[in-house]
Amino acid sequence: MRRFITTIITAALLGGPVAAQDLGGTLKKIKDTGTITLGHRESSIPFSYLDDKQQPIGYALDLCMKIVDAVKTELKIPNLKVTLQPVTSSNRIPLLQNGTIDLECGSTTNSVARQEQVSFGPTYFVINVSAAVKKSSSVNTIADLDGKTVSTTSGTTSVPLIKSYEKAKGVDVKEIYGKDHAESFLLLADDRAAAFIMDDILLAGQIANARNPADYRILPESLRQEPYSMMLRKGDAPFKALVDRAVGAVMKSGEIEKIYAKWFTAPIAPKGVNLNFPMTPVIRDAFKNPNDKGV
Amino acid sequence: MKLDIFLQQVPDGDGTWWQSLASGLQWTLLVALLAWIMAFALGSLVGVARTTDKRWLTRLGDTYVELFRNIPLLVQFFLWYFVVPGLIPSVKVWVTTLDPTQHQLVTAIVCLGFFTSARIAEQVRSGIQSLARGQRNAGYAVGLTQVQTYRFVLLPMAYRIIIPPLTSELMNLIKNTAVAYSIGLTELFFRTREMGEMTFRYFEAFAAATLIYIVISMAANRVMAFIERRVAVPGYIAGSH
Amino acid sequence: MGDLDFEIIGRALPYLAGGLRYTFQLTLVAATGGVIFGTLLAMARLSSFKPLALAAAGYVNLMRSIPLLLVIFWFYFMMPVLLQSLTGAERPPQIGAERSAYITFVMFEAAFFCEIMRAGIQSIAKGQAGAGYALGLNYWQVMGKIVLPQAFRNMLPILLTQSIILFQDVSLVSLLNVTDFVGAAVKVAQRDSRVVEMYLFVAVVYFVLCFALSAAVKRLQLRIAIVR
C-alpha cells in the first residue's frame, strides 16, 4: 500500500507519463520480447480499419508490415510475433508513449504540435480537410455552414481547424463530436449534423461504406493540407532510421504504386467499393522525396 | 507536475484549460441538479405506487423499476440518444430542430432522471414499508384519505429514514453524469479528456478532475447531512433502520 | 431510418457472442478478485493499527467518490508507468485495454465489496471472535475459520447484487475500444449503420440476463433467510 502511494507521488513529481527515452529503445524492446505491437484504427478506411471478419486491414497496415519485415531481418527474428491493438484518435498518442503500442498505423496527421510528443515516419499520404454533406442539402461551401451544426471526431486536428476557421471568417457553427469517424458520419447520415468535417479521403471512405453512397458529396474546398504518417516514439533514433529506410525503400522502388492502387483505385473490403482516389501530384512528390515534415 | 498548464490557452478556444474544466463542471452540476429534481419527483411517485393497495399500480411500479435497473446506463444513453429518435419519426423531427447542445443536455437529463428515479423509487418503497403498519392505520383511523395519509403521515417519516441512501444516490448521480460524455455532452469528464488529448498532459488533467469530483462529492454529502440534521425528529434517529 | 433490418443481428451473432463472453469473463474475474481484495481491505479498515485502517479507508473513499469512467481511464493510461516503477522493470509492461480492464475492475470493485464485507464482519457477534481467541486461535484463524465464512454467507445476496451492477458497469470498457458485448455491438452498428437495431438488441439481452439474475438472487435471499 505504502509502495503504491509512494509510486503515485513519484509519478506526480515526475509529471505523469515518463518520457520516451525511459522506455529503452523500441528495437531492444522488440528483441527482448520477441513481439512488436502495431496500433491500428477501426474505421479509418482505407488506411486502417476492420473488414467483415473484424480483422484490421488497410494501406497503412500494409506499409507497417514492410517495417515489420525490416525489423525481422535487422534483429534476425524470423518468427517475430505481431500483436494488433486497436486505438482511437484520442488514445493513440498516450498508448504509444506508455509503451502499449510500438508503431501506430492509422491516419495520423504529422503536425508540428504532435512532433513535440512523438516521431513520424515518411509521409505516405496527403489529405485536404474538407466537409461531407448530403447532396439534398443547400450547403455548397464551408461558409454556408454558418449557423448550422457540424460533426467531427474528437481528438483530431479538425477540431482546432474548425475553431480557427470560425474566428477567421466570422462564421458560427456548432460542433458535435463523435468518438470515431463512423460515429461522426452517423451524425451526418442521421441529419443530426449538416456536415462532417474531416480529412477528404476519410470522408470518401465513410461515404463508400454508407448505405446510400450516392446521397453524399465532399465539398471541393480545403481547410488545410495535411501529411499522414506512421507514429513512433520520440527520441528513438535507431528505430526511426529503420522505419525511414524500410518505407523509403518501398517508395523509391516503385512498389508503393502497387500498394497505393490496391487501396485507392481498386475495390476494397468489406463491400467491394472503389474509392477512385488516384495519386495527386502532392502525394507523388512525397513518394519521390520521402520526408517527415509536419504541418 | 507542472500546474502552469491550467493557465495556458486552449488552442483556438476562448480561455484557459482551467476555464474549460470549470465550464465542464457547470454542465455536470446543471445536469445533476435537473436530473435529480426529475428523479426525485418520478421516483417518489413510483415508490409510493408500489406501496399502495392497488395491485395493478404496484405491478406497474415494479416493472418500471426493473426496466431501468436492468439495462446498463451506457446502453440507456444510446437508447435515448440514437434509438428513440430513430424509431419515432416525430421525435426525430423535433430533435433535428434542436440545438445539438440542447439535445445532448435534454438527453442526459432524461436518461439520468429515469435511471436514478428507479433507484429512488426503490428507496422510497423500502422507507415506507419500514414504517410500522400502525402508522398507516392511524392515518385512516383519524379520517385521512389514502392520499392524505401518504402526504401527512407516511412520506414525511419515510423521507427522513431514507436520507442516507438518498445521499449515496445523489453522489452516484453526480458520478454518473460522466457517462454523458459518450453522447458528446461537454461536461467535466469530456473536458478532462479533451485537455488530455490536446495537451498530452493526461496526468494533470485527470488529477484535476479527480480532485473536483471528490470536492463535489463531499459537498453533496455535507448538504445532505445538513438537511438530515435540520429535519430530524427529536427522539427519532433517522437512518437507524 | 424507417426500414429496420434485424437480420444484421443474425449475421453478427458470432462476433457479439465473443463480446458477451468477454463481458462474463471480466465480471467473473472482477467479482472474485474484488471480493478477495475487498475482504482484505475490510480487515484493514477494521484493524486496530491506525495507519493501516486510515490508508484502507482513504482508498475506499477515493474509489467511491470518483466516476468509474475516470478510474478506467486513469488505469488505462497510467498503469504501465505505475507498474514499471512498482516492479522496477526496465520498461513499462505492455498492457492492452483488455488486461487493463481486468485490473481496473478488481481494484475498483474491491472498494465496494470492502464496504459490504465490513458490514458482514461487523454483523458477527464480537463474542464469537472472543471465543476463538480464548481457544488459542490466532487472528488469521479466527477470521478464516469463524468470522469470514459467516460474514460471507450473510452478505452473499448483497455481494451477488453488487456483481450484477458490476456486470452492467463492464459495458463502460467499450469506451476504451474494448470488444465487450456493448463494444462489439457498437462496432457492428457503426460499420453497417444499423444503430437502432443493434442497440435495441443489446438492451434486450442485458435486460433479460440481469432480470433473470436478480430474480435468482431474490430466491436465494429468501432461502438464506429461512435457513437462518
Image (spheres, rainbow, N blue to C red):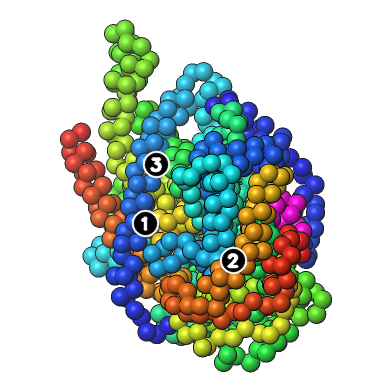
State the residue position of label 1: C19
Residue A288 pos. (x, y %): 71, 67
- What is the spatial separation of the Cα atoms under label 1 and label 3, in whole angstroms? 16 Å
User: Residue at left 55%, top 68%?
Assistant: A259
Q: Which of the 4 image quarters holds residue B191?
A: bottom right
Check the residue under mark 3 and report the chain it is in: C
| Disc 1 + disc 2, Cβ < 8 Å | no
Q: Which residues are magenta?
A: A107-120
Query: Which is more foreground, mark 1 or mark 2?
Result: 2
Query: Which is more foreground, mark 1 or mark 3?
Result: 1
Alpha-carbon neighbours of circle 1 within 10 Å: few (<14), some, or many (≥20)?
many
Is C111 situated above or below A170? above
Q: Amino acid at mark 2?
A: Glu
**Magenta highlight on residue A116:** yes
Mark 3 lies on a secondary structure that is helix
State whether discs 1 and 3 lie on one chain. yes
Q: Amino acid at mark 3?
A: Ala
Mark 2 lies on a secondary structure that is helix
- What is the spatial separation of the Cα atoms under label 2 and label 3, in whole angstroms? 49 Å
State the residue position of label 2: A255
**Magenta highlight on residue A118:** yes
State the residue position of label 3: C30
Residue C1 pos. (x, y %): 43, 83
Query: Which is more foreground, mark 2 or mark 3?
Result: 2
Q: Which of the 4 image quarters holds residue B143?
A: bottom left
Mark 1 or mark 3, which has the lower sequence index?
Answer: 1
